[in-house]
C-alpha cells in the first residue's frame, strides 16, 4: 500500500460538511505555499491495507485478534508498570477529535495521521472523552458513537489508547483551540444556582468545573456530582468492556480544570489572569464557605471561617506585593496554616472521592488509572510558593505539598501524571522565580516515596530538540525513579512539518532506547516505512503537500 498525504479531493470528501471547522487544531483546511515542497509524507506498507468495518455495539475482534491484542498489551504494560529503560510514548489527539454532533471528525485524515504516528514508533494516543459531548442530551443519555469509531480504528492499527474522563469544559485555558462547555442541562442548573461552580473573592464564577464544595449534595437533578461522574464512567466501562485492558490501556480520571486535580486559580481565557500572576483562592461559593465556617467553628475559631485571607492580593500580583504571600507573610501564621490545610485538604478529599469511585468501576478491567497534577512552576523559588497555594497545593519552602497527593493516589493504585516535563529553568523569566526542573525533581521524589508510578506530559506545544532532550533527561531514573510513560501534547499539522517531524521521530526512538542519542535513518520500519521531505526525493515536479490532521 502506498498512501500519500496531499491536497487531493481523492483523499478528503470536500462535500462532507457534517462537522464544523475549529481553530487550527484538527482541520482539513491548511495553506499550500507555491514553492518546492519542504515536506511530503508517505506511508507504505508491505501488507494489505486494513479494512475498517462499521463500528458495532460490541467488539469486532475475533478471538485470534483478541489474543494478539492481549499479548501486545501485556508486553508493553510491563514497561509501563516498571521504571525500566524504555519509556512508552503516547500522543494527545486534537481536542475536537469527536465533533459537537458526536461523530468522529475527519476520519480519513485521522486514519492517515494515526498510521504516521504508528510508523514513528509511538505506543498509542490519548483522547478526551468530553462530558459536554457525551451526556449533552440529558441526564444519563450517553452518546459514545464517535469514540467507538475511533477506538475501533485505533485497535485495528495495533495502537493503545489513554482515555481522559474529561468532566471540565474545553476553552479558556492554554492551548484550548475549541469550545466544549459542560452539558447544557448542567449549565441550566448552574444558571439557577451559580454557587455550583467555583467563585473568587470578587464574586466571579468560573464555569469550567463543578465546585468540589457540593460533591456530596444532590444538586444535579437529584444526583450528586460524584454520582454523575461515577455513572458516566460506568457507562463508558459497559460500552467499551471488550476494549478495556486491550486497546484501552489507561483511564485518566479528570478531577478539575484541564482535567487536573486543582482549583481554577489562574483562569486565562477571559484575561482575568496573566503569567506569572499568583492567582486567587477559589473558595467563595456558598458550599465552600459553609465548609470553611464549619471547620473553623469545630476548633473554636469562628472568626477564621468568615472567608479566605483578606490580604492574599489579586490574580496578577507578585507574592511580595501581598500581606499573605510575602516572605514573612500571613501564610506562616496559625491562621494561615489553618486555612491552607483546609483548602488543600478539601482538594485531596475531592480527588479521593472520584478516584475511589473509579477504582471500583474499573477494577478487573486491566486498564490502568491515572490522575493529573498541574506543573505550577512560577514563584517556586519563593518561600510561600504562592501560585501553588492558590491552586490547592500546600507546598512551601518548608512543606512538601505533593507527597500527600502521591500517597492519596497510591491508596487507589493510580499513576500520577505530571506536566512541564519539557521545561528548563534557564528558559523562564527571572522575575517569575520559576523552577520547573526543581518542581519536577520534587514530584519525582514524592512519587518515589509513595511508591507509585510517575508519568509525564509537556505543558506547552514544543517541537524543538531542546524540549525533547529535557524530557528524555527527566525520564531517566537517575534517582531511582523515572517516567513510566510520556504523553506528548499534541497531534496537529505543525507536528508533521519536516523539521518538527524529524525531531519528534528521533525523540520517540530515544525514549524507546533508554535515552540513548539516535539519528533518524532514511526510513522508520515498524510495519510501515515513513518518509518525510528531508529524505532525498526522486520527484522534481512541484506539488502542494501537507499533512491533514
Image: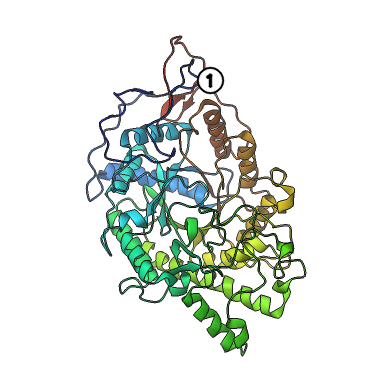
Residue 309 located left or right of residue 533: right
Q: Where residue 73 appears, x then y in whole percent?
A: 41, 46
Q: Residues within 10 Å of mark 1 (few under 14, many from 20)?
A: some
Residue at horizontal 58%, vertical 61%?
451
Q: Nearer the viewer, residue 332 or 127?
A: 332
Q: Nearer the viewer, residue 237 or 74?
A: 237
Q: Quadrant of residue 262?
A: bottom right
Q: Determine which residue is flagged by label 1.
A: 534
Q: Nearer the viewer, residue 439 or 214?
A: 214
Q: Secondary structure at mark 1?
A: loop
Residue 318 located left or right of residue 145: right
Q: Where residue 483 appears, x then y in whole percent?
A: 58, 49
Q: Is residue 127 above or below residue 216?
A: above
Q: Is residue 184 above or below residue 108?
A: below
Residue 253 located left or right of residue 139: right
Q: Where residue 44 appears, x then y in whole percent?
A: 39, 23
Report the quarter where the C terminus lies: top left
* Residue 475 visible in the snapshot: yes
Report the quarter where the N terminus lies: top left
Which color scheme does this rendered protein use?
rainbow
* Residue 515 visible in the snapshot: no
Residue at horizontal 70%, vertical 70%?
324
Q: Quadrant of residue 99?
A: top left
Residue that sits furthest to the right in the current view: 328
Residue that sits furthest to the bottom in the current view: 300
Q: Where residue 193 appears, x then y in whole percent?
A: 39, 72
Q: Is residue 343 above or below residue 371?
A: below
Residue that sits furthest to the front in the current view: 202
Amino acid at each position: 500500500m502506498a498512501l500519500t498525504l496531499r491536497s487531493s479531493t481523492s483523499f478528503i470528501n470536500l462535500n462532507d460538511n457534517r462537522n464544523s471547522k475549529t481553530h487550527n487544531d484538527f482541520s482539513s483546511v491548511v495553506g499550500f505555499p507555491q514553492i518546492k515542497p519542504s515536506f511530503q509524507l508517505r506511508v507504505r506498507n508491505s501488507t494489505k491495507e486494513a479494512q475498517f468495518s462499521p463500528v458495532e455495539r460490541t467488539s469486532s475482534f475475533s478471538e485470534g485478534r483478541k489474543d494478539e491484542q492481549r499479548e501486545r498489551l501485556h508486553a508493553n504494560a510491563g514497561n509501563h508498570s516498571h521504571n525500566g529503560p524504555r519509556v512508552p510514548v503516547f500522543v494527545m489527539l486534537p481536542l475536537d477529535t469527536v465533533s459537537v454532533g458526536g461523530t468522529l471528525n475527519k476520519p480519513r485524515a485521522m486514519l492517515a495521521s494515526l498510521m504516521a504516528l504508528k510508523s514513528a514508533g509511538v505506543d498509542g494516543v490519548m483522547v478526551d472523552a468530553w462530558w459536554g459531548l457525551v451526556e449533552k442530551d440529558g441526564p444519563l443519555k450517553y452518546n459514545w458513537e464517535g469514540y467507538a469509531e475511533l477506538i475501533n480504528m485505533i485497535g485495528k492499527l495495533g495502537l493503545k489508547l489513554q482515555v481522559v474522563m474529561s468532566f471540565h469544559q474545553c476553552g479558556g485555558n492554554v492551548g484550548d483551540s475549541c469550545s466544549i462547555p459542560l452539558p447544557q442541562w448542567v449549565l441550566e442548573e448552574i444558571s439557577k444556582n451559580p454557587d455550583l461552580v467555583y467563585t473568587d473573592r470578587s464574586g466571579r464564577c468560573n464555569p469550567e468545573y463543578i465546585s468540589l464544595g457540593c460533591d456530596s449534595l444532590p444538586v444535579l437533578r437529584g444526583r450528586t456530582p460524584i454520582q454523575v461522574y461515577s455513572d458516566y464512567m460506568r457507562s463508558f466501562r459497559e460500552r467499551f468492556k471488550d476494549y478495556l485492558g486491550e486497546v484501552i490501556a489507561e483511564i485518566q480520571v479528570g478531577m478539575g480544570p484541564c482535567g487536573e486535580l486543582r482549583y481554577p486559580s489562574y483562569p486565562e481565557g477571559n484575561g482575568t489572569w496573566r503569567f506569572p500572576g499568583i492567582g486567587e483562592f477559589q473558595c467563595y461559593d456558598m458550599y465552600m464557605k459553609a465548609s470553611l465556617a464549619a471547620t473553623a467553628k469545630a476548633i473554636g475559631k469562628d472568626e477564621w471561617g468568615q472567608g479566605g485571607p483578606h490580604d492574599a492580593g489579586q490574580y496578577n500580583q507578585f507574592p511580595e506585593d501581598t500581606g499573605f504571600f510575602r516572605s514573612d507573610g500571613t501564610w506562616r501564621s496559625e491562621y494561615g496554616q489553618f486555612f491552607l490545610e483546609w483548602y488543600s485538604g478539601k482538594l485531596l478529599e475531592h480527588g479521593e472521592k472520584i478516584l475511589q469511585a473509579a477504582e471500583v468501576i474499573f477494577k478487573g478491567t486491566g486498564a490502568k488509572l491515572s490522575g493529573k497534577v498541574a506543573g505550577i512552576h512560577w514563584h517556586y523559588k519563593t518561600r510561600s510558593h504562592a501560585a501553588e497555594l492558590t491552586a490547592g497545593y500546600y507546598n512551601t519552602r518548608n512543606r512538601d505539598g505533593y507527597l500527600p497527593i502521591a500517597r492519596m493516589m497510591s491508596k487507589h493504585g493510580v499513576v500520577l501524571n505530571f506536566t512541564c516535563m519539557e521545561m528548563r529553568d534557564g528558559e523562564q523569566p527571572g522575575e517569575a522565580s520559576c523552577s520547573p526542573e526543581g518542581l519536577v525533581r520534587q514530584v519525582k521524589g514524592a512519587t518515589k516515596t509513595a511508591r507509585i508510578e510517575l508519568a509525564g506530559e509537556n505543558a506547552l506545544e514544543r517541537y524543538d530538540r531542546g524540549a525533547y532532550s529535557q524530557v528524555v533527561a527527566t525520564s531517566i531514573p537517575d534517582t531511582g525513579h523515572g517516567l513510566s510513560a510520556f504523553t506528548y501534547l499534541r497531534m496537529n499539522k505543525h507536528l508533521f512539518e519536516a523539521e518538527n517531524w524529524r525531531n519528534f521521530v528521533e525523540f520517540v526512538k530515544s525514549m524507546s532506547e533508554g535515552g540513548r542519542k539516535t539519528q533518524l535513518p532514511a526510513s522508520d520500519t515498524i510495519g510501515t516505512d515513513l518518509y518525510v521531505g528531508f529524505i532525498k526525493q526522486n520527484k522534481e515536479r512541484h506539488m502542494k503537500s501537507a499533512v491533514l490532521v
